Amino acid sequence: MIPFDLAQFDEVGQDDHTASVIETSIKPFLGKAGLEREGAALLLSRLYMRQDTANRFGPFLKWAQARFENGIVDVFIVLGVLQVICEVVKSGSLGQIQQESARLYALAESIDKHPTFSSNTAIRKYKTKLLSRIAIRSLPSLNIGRRKGRLLANEGNIDRNPVQQNDIEVPHEVESVLEHLCNSLQDKDTVVRWSAAKGVAHISERLPLDFSDQIFETILNLFSIHSIAAASLYDLPAIAESTWHGACLACAEMTRRGLVAQSRLSELIEWLSKALFFDLRKGAHSIGSNVRDAAAYVIWALARSQVPSTLAPFSHNLAQRLTAVALYDREIHIRRAASAAFQEHVGRNNLFPCGIDVLGKTDFYAVSIRRNAFLVAAPQVAQHWDPTMRELGSQSLRSICLGSLDIFGPMAIEKSAHSIDVSDLHGGLLALSEIAIAYREIGDHNSWEVQLRKIFRCLAHIPFDVLIGPRNAIVTAAACRLISITVTLPELHPDTTSVPQWRKIVDHGLKHRTLYVQEAGADAMASQSLGILIGAIDYSVYDNALFDAVACLLEIVKSGQTLPKPNIEARRNCYAAISRIMSTIGGNIHRYLSIEVVTSLFECLLDGLDDYSTDQRGDVGSWIRVACIQSLTTSIEVLIRNAKEIVAFHNYLPPSLLHSAVCGILKQGVERLDNVRQEAGVCFLRLLHLPLPEVHNATSWQLPGLTLLKELFGSNDSIGWNEASWLFPRAVRLLEVPEYRPSVLLGLVFSLGSKTESTVGSEISLCSSNSHALVQYRPLAASLISYVKLLPVTNKNNGYDLITLVEDLIARAKSNLASNVIVIPVLQTFDILLEGDALTNIFDDPLGSKRL
C-alpha cells in the first residue's frame, strides 16, 4: 500500500472516492475459489488497517454479519471474509480490535447457526484462528521473550513477573474462547486441531501461571476421555485419534513456550509414552500415525524447554521408547521425528544412556529407509556394547522373526554366535535364546524340537574356554539360559547329545561367584528340563533323592497351587517323569514310596486328563493329556507286572484306581482331537491285553465289560482310533457298560459340541422322495443317532434305554449350569438327536415326554 493518505487522490467534492473504489472493486474477488481470493483478502485487510481507512472496518463487519445471518452467502465468500478479519485482528491496532470485539465475537458465533458453514473444514479453521486472535489481543502482553536457540544447562524456565500477573483481569470472553478451543482440539480435521493448539498456547502465554497450569491440566484430561472404558491402548475407539492428536499438539505448543510446570512432567510423559505407540486398526488400514508424530514433537519440545535436572528421572524411559519408534515404526516421517527428538535430547541434555553411539546408528538418514531401519540399524543396536541394549535388541529380534519364523528363524540362527568377541558372543547367545522361545510359541512339538536341537548345537561351535572364562560371566549366564530353553531329551543322554560339555557349563554356572550366573545355572537345571532330569535319574543308586524329586514333581503339576503355573512344556515333562520313576523303581516301589505318595501321583495324572489349557498355539492342554495317558498306562503296567513283589499291592493300585484310569483314557479316546484319540486307543489296548496281577482275588482288576471290549477292539485291525469312521460306530456301544458310561458319554458330548470335521461335521440335503430334510451326519453324529434309534424307551433288564440317556444328559447339564463348556455341547447333542429323529420313540412314553 502507498505510504500516504489516499484522500490525496480524491477529486474535489468526492471524499473517500479512492478508498471506496478500491474496496468495491476488491470485494467481489472474496467469493472466488482460487488464489485471487487470497490476494483480495490480503489487500482488504491492509486497507482496513490503514489509519486513514480504518473507519471502513466497522461497516465491513456489519456487511459481513448481515450476509452471514441471512445464510445465503457462498462458502467461498465466508472464507474470504474470515481471512480479511483474521489478518486485521492479528496486525491491526489494539484500539480498532477492542472497539469491534463484541461484533467480532457475534460474527464468529453466527457461523455455527448454519450447518453448511460449520461443516466446512476451512471455515472452522478460520473461526478457531479468529477467536484465538481476539482473545490474544484482549490480553496484555507480559513481554516474555520467546526462547530461541540452545537451552544452556544453567538456564531455568523463564519466570514471569508475579506482580504483573496479579494485575491481569481476564475477560469472561477469554474463558469462552478457551472452552471452544478445547473442543476444537478434538475436531475431526487436523488443520482445525493445529490452529486450536497454537491458539491455546498463545493465550496461555499471556495468562497468569496458575491459570495456564489449569489450562494444561484440562488438556491432559483430554487423553483420558476415551481411555476410561478401554482395557488397553488398542481398545480405544477410532474417534480417540482426533482427541489424542489435538492434546499432543496443544502440549507441544505449550511446552515450546515453557508453560509446563515441573509437577506436570510425570503425568505428561506417562501419556506421551502411550501416544508414541498409538496405532488403531480400522478396516484394512490403521490410524494413529499423526498421534505418534505429535507425541515425538512434544518430546522434542521438552528437550528445548526443560532443564536437564527436571528430565533426568524420565530419560531412560524416553530413550527406550524413542529408539523403538525410530527403528520400528511403519511410517518414515515418524521414524524421522523420533530420531530428531532423540537427537535433540542427546545434544541439549546428554541424559540418554549411550546416546551418541545409538544416535550414530539411528540418525535421520539411517531410519529413513524402512528396510535399513529394520535390518541394519536395529541389529547394530542389538550388538551394542551395553548389555542392556543387547538384551533389548535380542527381544526385538524375536518379535521381528515371529512374523515369518520359517524364513527369519534359520537366518538368525546362522548369523548368531560365530564370534569370539565377548560382546558379540553375548548378543548372539541372547538372540539364539529368543529365537528358541519364538519357536516354542508358535510351533508344534515335533517341529520345534528339531529347531531347538539345531540351536542347542550352536554351543558346540563356541570354544569351551570362552564360555567359562573367568571374565566372561555374562557369556556363561547367557549360555546357561540358552541351555535351559533348548535342552531336549536326546541331549540329556551322553550318547546322543551334540554338545558333550553342556553339563560342565551348567556346573560352572552353579559354582560361579556371581549371583546372576548362579541363577542362570539354576534355571538350566530347573524350568522345563527339570522334569526330564528327574525322570532320568537312577533312583536305585540315588534313593535318598527320590522323596524330594517326587515332592518337586507334585508341586509343579498340582493344579491347586497358588504360585503361577510353569509353562506347558515343563508340566508335560513332569507328568512324563512320573512313569519313568515308576519304571525305575519297579517292584521295589513299597521300599521307596509310601501308599499315600503313589496315590497322589495317580491323582495328579487323572487330574491331568482334564487339562484343556489353550494359548496362541491352540489346545496345548492336549500335550498334557497325552502325557498323562501314556504315564498312567506305563505306571499301571509296571505295578501289575510286579504285583507279586509289591507288598500291599492292593493299596498301591486299588481296583477302583485302575477303573478310574481306564474311564479317563476311554473319555480321551472318543474326544475330538485325532492324535489324542490315537494315543488313547493305543494305551487302552495295552491295558486291555494286560494280564491280571498275580495276587489274591485278581479278578477285581479285570476290566468291566471285558467281553464287549474284546469284541469291539480285540482284533488286530490296523485301522487306528484316529479314523473316526472306524472308531465311533464301536465307541458308542461303550455306553452299554455302566462303569464307563458317564466318562464315555461326556467325551462324546464334548466331541459333538466341537467343530472338528472328523467327528461331527454335518450336511443337510433334501430328499427327493420326502418333503422334509434328510439330515446326514458324519461320523460320530451318525453313529450316535443309529445307536440311539436302537435303544428301547425303557429297559427292565437294567440295560441302557432312551429315558436313561436323556436323564444322563440333563443331569450332566444341571450339575454344570454355570459352565457353557458343558451346557452348550449337551444342548447341541439334543439338537442332533432331535434332527436325526433318534428320540421319536420317547414321546410314546409319558415319562419320556415329561423328561424332554
Image: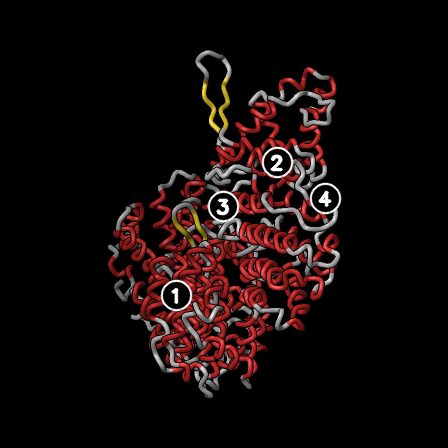
Q: Earlier in the sequence, mark 3 or mark 4?
A: 3
Q: Secondary structure at mark 3?
A: helix
The C terminus - image quarter:
top right
Judging by the rendered image, the residue that carries numbered circle 3 is: 675
Mark 1 or 4: in front is: 4
Task: Judge whether residue 322 can be spotted in this image.
Answer: no
Q: Marks 2 and 3: in contact by CB < 8 Å?
A: no
Mark 4 or 2: in front is: 4
Please tell me in which quadrant of the rendered image residue 738 appears.
top right
Q: How is the image coloured?
A: secondary structure
Q: Secondary structure at mark 2?
A: helix
Counting other residues with Cα less than 10 Å from the Cα at mark 4, is it few (<14), some (14-19), or many (20 or more)? Answer: some
Residue 42 appears left or right of 850: left
Judging by the rendered image, the residue that carries numbered circle 1 is: 454
Labelled disc at residue 322? none
Amino acid type at image mark 2: Ile
Residue 347 appears left or right of 514: left
**Residue sitting at 52 percent across and 56 percent down?**
233
Judging by the rendered image, the residue that carries numbered circle 2 is: 824
Q: Earlier in the sequence, mark 1 or mark 2?
A: 1
Q: State the CA–CA distance, disc 1 to disc 4.
A: 50 Å
Q: State the CA–CA distance, disc 3 to disc 1.
A: 26 Å
Please tell me in which quadrant of the rendered image residue 704 appears.
top right
Q: Earlier in the sequence, mark 3 or mark 1?
A: 1
Mark 3 or 2: in front is: 3
Amino acid type at image mark 4: Ser
* Towards the viewer: 168 or 315: 315
Q: Marks 1 and 3: in contact by CB < 8 Å?
A: no
Amino acid type at image mark 1: Lys
Judging by the rendered image, the residue that carries numbered circle 4 is: 700
**Residue sitting at 44 percent across and 55 percent down?**
446
Q: Earlier in the sequence, mark 4 or mark 2?
A: 4
